[in-house]
Image (cartoon, rainbow, N blue to C red):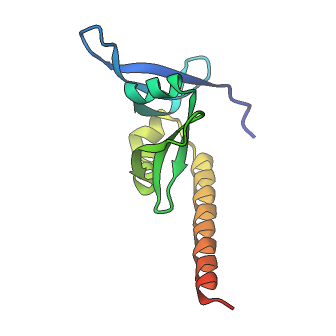
Amino acid sequence: MSPPVSLEPFVEPIDRTLDFNGAAGYRIGYRMGPDGKAITSTTVTAEIIEKIVNLRGSVALTITPDGEVAVAVSYSNSVESALHGAAPIDNLVRNALNFENLRMEEASAADLRILLQRLQSSVDLVREAIDGMARCSKGP
């Protein structure tokens, strides 16, 4: 069993312009350990971050029924909600399994077996949902 890991959320500006308009976007995610290595992150435009702060909103990662992973933004004082930066889940898995990424993350075979188990579990859930929809469409 691995020792507990200390994760800290972060928001950092990116794409700074030379004028006084500030950052064009932010990288948000989680850092791990004493060296502060980012273990997961995504890029969000400054406009979205400003809306979230001004409207007391929240940000979460979500997955659409067709397998797109996106940043979901919702606002406490509004029914407005939006998805940003959608990417197909298979592309995310492909990028995560890139040799250089695996090397930098110091991934082990045990880590990849855990990923495989989670993906297999996810496939089982999708199959169950498809079967449930098929049963519902057939009726009694």
As drawn, 96 above or below 137: above
Residue under the image location 40 percent in, 19 percent down: 13
Position of residue 56 in the picture relative to residue 20 (left or right): right
Nearer to me, 60 or 81: 81
Position of residue 2 in the picture relative to residue 115 (left or right): right
User: Which quarter of the rendered picture does the N terminus lie within?
Assistant: top right
Picture quadrant of residue 139:
bottom right
As drawn, 49 above or below 72: above
Residue under the image location 58 percent in, 52 percent down: 115
Position of residue 23 in the picture relative to residue 59 (left or right): left
Nearer to me, 124 or 21: 21
Residue under the image location 57 percent in, 43 percent down: 108
Picture quadrant of residue 12:
top left
Picture quadrant of residue 47:
top left
- Most extreme residue toward the top is 20
Position of residue 32 in the picture relative to residue 51 (left or right): right
Q: Position of residue 105 (x, y in %)?
A: 51, 35
Q: Position of residue 21 (x, y in %)?
A: 30, 13
Mark count: 0
Nearer to me, 27 or 56: 56
User: Which quarter of the rendered picture does the C terminus lie within?
Assistant: bottom right
Q: Position of residue 126 (x, y in %)?
A: 58, 68
As drawn, 117 above or below 139: above
- Most extreme residue toward the left is 18
Q: Position of residue 33 (x, y in %)?
A: 62, 22
- Most extreme residue toward the bottom is 140
